Amino acid sequence: MPRTKASELREMSDEQLMLTLKETTESLFRLRIQAATERLDAPSELRRHRRLIAQIKTILTERQRQRALAQGGPEAIVLVKKKKKKKKKKA
């Protein structure tokens, strides 16, 4: 899988990004299984796949927030943000 630049990812449509995300996630899964069962030819592939997944998710989130802003104003961003989980205190 050739290295994809962020500018190339930003030029893709949402459907293309989702397809690339799915393929990369499946490929990362296969690499993890291979790493657990045998030696990897290029261990750096794991890192590269994780970073690509993070880049794609970041771009998709940015687009989602831009659409929410365009539709509902600044109040819409509050709805887009994820809720933080509360940590449970140990007794």
Image (cartoon, rainbow, N blue to C red):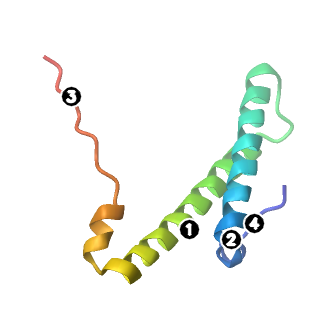
Position of residue 88 in the picture relative to residue 31 (left or right): left
What residue does disc 3 label? 88
Up/down of 54 relative to 44, above or below: below
Of the numbered discs 1 and 4, the one sitting upstream in the chain is 4
Of the numbered discs 2 and 3, the one sitting upstream in the chain is 2
Are the two marked residues, 4 and 2, in contact with CB atoms closer than 8 angstroms?
A: yes
Front residue of 36/13: it is: 13
Q: Which element is circle 2 on?
A: helix
Of the numbered discs 1 and 3, the one sitting upstream in the chain is 1
Residue 59's tag is 1
Which circle, 4 or 2, is nearer the viewer? 2
Q: In the figure, residue 31 lies in which quadrant? A: top right
- For the residues labelled 1 and 2, the Cα–Cα distance comes to 8 Å
Q: Which element is circle 1 on?
A: helix
Residue 9's tag is 2
Horizontal and vertical percent position of residue 38: 82, 23
- For the residues labelled 4 and 2, the Cα–Cα distance comes to 7 Å
Q: Which element is circle 4 on?
A: loop
Q: Residue at x 40, y 83 (%)?
A: 70
- For the residues labelled 3 and 4, the Cα–Cα distance comes to 40 Å
What residue does disc 4 label? 4
Q: Quadrant of the C terminus?
A: top left
Front residue of 81/5: it is: 81
Q: Residue at x 38, y 80 (%)?
A: 71
Position of residue 63 in the picture relative to residue 16 (left or right): left
Are the two marked residues, 1 and 2, in contact with CB atoms closer than 8 angstroms?
A: yes
